[in-house]
Amino acid sequence: MASAHTQALPRPTLRRRPAFSLRRWTEREGVFSWLMVIPPALFLMALVGYPFVYGIWLSLLDRPVAKPGVFIGLDNFITALHDPVFWRVAQNTFVYTFAATALKMAGGLALALVMNQEFRFKNLIRAVMLLPFIVPTVLSTIAWMWILDPSFSVINWFLVHWGITKPGPSWLGNPGWAMFSLIMVNTWRGLPFYAITLLAGLQTISPELYEAATIDGASTFARFRYVTVPLLKPVIFIVTMFSVIFTFSDFQLVYVLTRGGPANATHLFATYAFDVAMSGGQFGLGASIALSMLPPLALLIAGMAWYMRSEKT
Amino acid sequence: MIVEKRGFRARSLKLWLPLGFFMIFNLFPFYWMAITSLKPNSELYSRKIMPLIVYHPTLEHFVNLLSETNFLLWTYNTMLVAVVSTAISLIFGVMLAYPLARMQFPGAALISFAVAATYLVPQPLLFIPLADIINRLGLGDTLTSVILTYPTLLVPFCAWLLMGYFKSVPHELEDAARIDGATRLQTMFRIFLPLCVPGFISAGIFAFTLAQNEFLYALIFLTKTDVRTVPVGAIAELVRGDVFYWGQLMAAALLGSIPVAIIYSFFVEHYVAGLTSGGVKA
């Protein structure tokens, strides 16, 4: 709307056809916009677009570190698909993503509902609750590493002290417990993000809707099911989408806590690709493993988008 | 408000009990971090004594951390990288967001789609090709490597957040400036951007915490001790072989977290506004 009369400014000059003026040219809306957009767009193309395409090319090469690559077509992908560890990694990634996302959603929604009441020091408590999300992940994971330490775990100290178990589980040494621990730590870190975002969503729901539902005789659960959930759905969708992408491609937590062990039980796509490419020195194979997380991730997101659409109609 | 009168018991059951549970769950690791960093080794590695309290607090781990390792240098590196990459990201973010939010031009839809797509590309998809590119450019083990690559994570995010903010500013002031003969650049710098300071703080604080948090690129690109950032330095150098220097590790984790926490505490409201704008406005 504003463009209608801002564009009118340079137009009268056309009638007299003066000499080309650089200044007038750059004042045109389209020219000015593109002049602004081009530098950052080139930057992103060089450091996101190009590496992305180059990664696809790398995945088609046999490319040991510091040696020229040899084109081998889809051989890397075939090697990966015949590698039992690759399938273990795929399974781990799905288990990790689903379990952690479900826990973060449930816990985040619970915390958001609790915090959607009136109480003293609300802003202070909200700020403090976000700390796990603010503090650099690697640093807070170091604290978790010590909480889950094989010999000096505090959790085990209490379990033994209260006589619940004798030695206490080896939180990071046993395959099942290691995955469980990773899911818990991921939930711990991500839950505040869910809670605060969902809380903001809850606050946009008009109290009149709840009052109307109460007058119509709706129970607490019915109000939650038929007022809160439907109105919160768009927020839930966005938050879940972000969380699924970043949980599926998680690296830091696993690298710090277990390095994929014991016996590959906690390797995810990202950490396995890192191991193959950086520690094993096979850039091509590593790139193909990293790329193979794209199709399932795209399917997950498409599935969620489709679900959201079908719910709306 | 109507149902709010059922007294202290109902309220503590509905509010304080669950809130207390979440507080303990969320904050215990920080308490543990702080307390461990103050324990002498004899208490750290004892399975007999109650672990939740410190009996003889000591600063020896902090002293050792600062005197035996390059922790201060890592902190300086982390800050430098975070500040510079945040500044670059804000500038590029404005250059993308201003035209996309305030103007109409051919190709705008394509650009905004590309920005959203870059935002969603997970980092582990790019680290292998990027490692190769950085090496060929001869940028391995320089802070430039991360100063160049962090904005790839931050620019799309800043652009997205700023676009939302820019769209909420009314057009009248800019129109008035244009009618008075200001050029587009003058209008943008003198009239428009000063109105958007809260948006910059939101985007900046968010980008800053993300830059402090980054680990993967720093781990791959920075392999020498004098260019490392705090997270990489702590993981790579305080764990020597199979020996974990727990006291120093915790001291490093605590000292590394404090700057972020302090800056965050000054701008909580802006941070929350940035955090929730993505989810709620969409």
Image (cartoon, coloured by chain):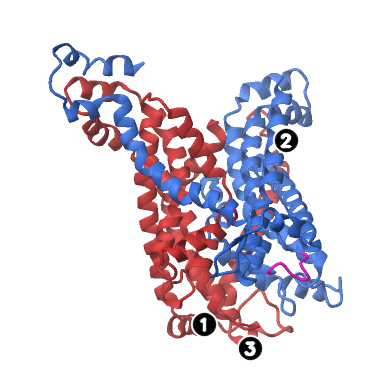
Chain colours: A blue, B red
Q: Main secondary structure of the magenta part?
A: loop
Residue A303 badge: 2
- Tell me the SS state at disc 1: helix
Badge 3 and badge 2 in a common chain: no
**Mark 2 and 1 residues: CB-CB less than 8 Å, in contact?**
no
Dot label at residue B42: 3
Marks 3 and 2 close (CB-CB < 8 Å): no
- Label located before the other in sequence (1 or 3): 3
Look at the numbered disc 3 and give the secondary structure of its residue.
Answer: helix
The alpha-carbon separation of the residues under discs 2 and 1 comes to: 50 Å
Three-letter amino acid code at the position of disc 2: Gly
Task: Kindly identify which residue carries mark 1.
Answer: B61
Amino acid type at image mark 1:
His
Q: Nearer the viewer, residue A311 or A18?
A: A18
| Foreground label between 3 and 2 | 2
Q: Residue at x 53, y 37 (%)?
A: B278
Question: Mark number for residue B78?
Answer: none
Give the spatial CA distance, label 1 vs label 3: 13 Å
Chain containing mark 3: B
Question: What range of the chain is rendered magenta?
Answer: A259-265
- B155 shown above or below B223: above
